[in-house]
Amino acid sequence: MTNLQQLKQWILESKSAVFFGGAGVSTESGIPDFRSVDGLYHQKFDYPPETIISHTFYERKPDYFFRFYREKMLPLGFEPNVTHKVLARLEKEGHLAAVVTQNIDGLHQKAGSKNVYELHGSVLRNYCVKCGKFYGAEVVKNAKGVPLCDCGGIIKPDVVLYEESLDQRTLEGAVAAIRKADLLIVGGTSLTVYPAAGLLHYYRGDRLVLINRDETPYDSYANLVFHEKLGEIFSQL
């Protein structure tokens, strides 16, 4: 039996699979990731991207933060790809219990997935730091300079910046889903960013599948490993 046949069989047998995904899920929709050759870390700015998207920088230089955020981190107008669509279908068919994602683009929900844990938040949700009023992404995108609420407060994207902690309820939900999973498929992530990568330690089963173009620190722990693009695997599912 080939690895792909084995994966198909495990999915069909599964009642509580979890998919844990990173930037590689969305790159095939045209959204650049951070660490690839043409990713954000390799583009030229006055400051390194990880400095700009830190809480300290956001507080000190909000104008510059929002300029960078609008240009590089606000992926609007993109469509779900085959991976997003297949995952939504597997959830509908009762095989997939949850998606845990490091992405902030909302494409899993756009594809139809219902139970999604967004570890790093979402660009689609924005709120006033003063009065708490919620705003859509278009308001932030179309604002000149720092987006301001009617009350005068800054409208902050609901994304987790460097130096900020993950949302506790989201994290707890993701951990619970992974703990209960009878199959864990990990895709499109280098598994080097913590605390997200550490979530794999909560998996109790013996059906761990890794799909990533490059090797990861967890390859030796996996029961199946595919060094291929996600779209190539999911288009066959």
Image: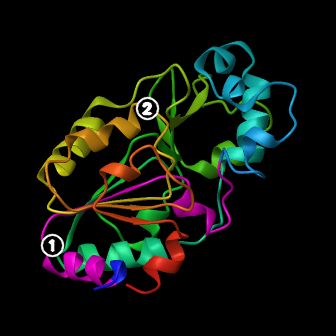
Q: Quadrant of residue 98?
A: bottom left
Residue 187: x and y in percent read 44, 60
Q: Which residue is mark 2?
A: 194
Label 1 SS? loop
Q: Nearer the viewer, residue 174 or 198?
A: 198
Q: Quadrant of residue 52?
A: top right
Estimate the x, y position of residue 26 in percent, counting from the top left: 56, 62
Residue interval drawn in magenta:
5-33
Can you see residue 88?
A: yes
Crowd around label 2: few <14 · some 14–19 · many ≥20 (10 Å): few
- Image height check: is 164 above or below 228? above
Residue 131 is tagged as: none
Q: Residue at x 17, y 76 (%)?
A: 94
The question of residue 166 being in magenta is answered with: no
Q: Position of 198 compared to 213: left or right?
A: left
> Residue visible at 12% across and 52% down?
180
Q: Is residue 38 above or below residue 147?
A: below
Disc 1 to disc 2, C-alpha distance = 28 Å
Q: Is residue 15 above or below residue 127?
A: below
- Circle 1: residue type: Ser
Q: In the rendering, at what x and y percent does residue 72 appear?
A: 74, 46
184 on left or right of 234: left
Quarter of the image for the N terminus: give it. bottom left
Q: Which residue occupies the foreground of this view, 40 or 55?
A: 40
